[in-house]
Amino acid sequence: MPETTSAAPASGTASTRRRQLIAGNWKMNGTRASGVALAGAVADMARRNAPPCDLVVCPPATILMAVGGRLAGSTVSFGGQDCHAKPDGAHTGDIAAPMLADLGCRYVIVGHSERRADHGESDTAVKAKATAALAAGLTIILCVGETEAQRDGGQATSVVGSQIAGSLPEGAAAENCIVAYEPVWAIGTGRTPTGEEIAAMHGHIRASLRKHVGEAADRMRLLYGGSVKPSNAAEILALDDVDGALVGGASLKAEDFLAIAAAARKP
Ligand code: 13P
């Protein structure tokens, strides 16, 4: 499986050695039939024309089993969109990380801004979920990102830095942790930061990560998310310290998702 991050020295050339990863966050979309059809189309297109990157889809929990079955034997991995901080117990409606692992998930998104907003998830709560996910053997896709008001107030880097400090779990390493920078104001809006803004934030995130995990930060993959589509993917994926994308709306169309993946940097 082409899923490992290749070893890279802590140097300016490291970004060219990190294999890019394109992850699709399907959010609250999909039935068994439509999800299996979408996953099948992604897997078939990736087999016919292998993109130069790793591919992951994160469907709703209700269809993980069906989608996972369709992706068996393909080059496309799958993951959950959230997990609980406890491995089991009296938590009606929640899903534990070992349950995701039991279904064959390799990944789980934690700390998405929609969960932070809709469910009041604090950095502390996100860290507990991330810790549980690592204990279950999953790789986390840890989301951070500022609101528009925070960016306008000049607080973007401090907000993202404190989200990293507050939600990065103990034991995070290049092999089990991916960080996704998703400015809240760019999600589902068609607006994106400029290339300079994305590169600057990713550089800042990597510098923050170095304080927490040392040189492993240079091998950790940093994804950009927020209105990524086929028309802007090549520009975004060519930026320094961008090691892939977390894609929402455009991941619901196999052609668009694969077009984004095709724009990934050649390893
Ligand atoms: P969009 O690609 O629809 O803007 O969503 C981004 C996102 O939230 C992925 O997690």
Image (tube, rainbow, N blue to C red):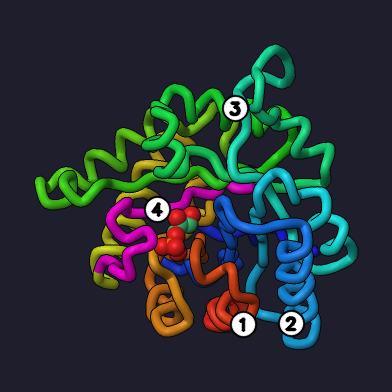
Instruction: Judge whether residue 10 can be spotted in this image.
Output: no
**Could one spot residue 200 in this view of the protein?**
yes
Disc 2 and disc 1: Cα gap in Å? Answer: 8 Å
On screen, residue 132 above or below 263? above
Q: Seen in the image, is 237 located left or right of residue 84?
A: left
Query: Which label belongs to residue 255?
Result: 1
Badge 2 amino acid: Met
Task: Report if the CB atoms under discs 4 and 3 are less than 8 Å apart.
Answer: no
Mark 3 element type:
helix
Q: Magenta region's main secondary structure? A: loop
Residue 131's label in the rendered image is 3
As drawn, which residue projects farthest toward the bottom?
49
Residue at image point 80% right, 63% down: 1
Mark nearer the N terminus (4 vs 2): 2
Amino acid at pointer 1: Glu
Determine if the C-beta at disc 3 is less than 8 A from ligand 1: no
- Give the mark nearest the N terminus, 1 or 3: 3
Name the residue: 76% across, 46% down.
105
Do labels 2 and 1 touch, CB within 8 Å? yes
Q: How crowded is mark 3: few (under 14 residues within 10 Å), some or many (20 or more)?
A: many
Q: Badge 4 is on which residue? A: 181
Q: Quadrant of the C terminus?
A: bottom right
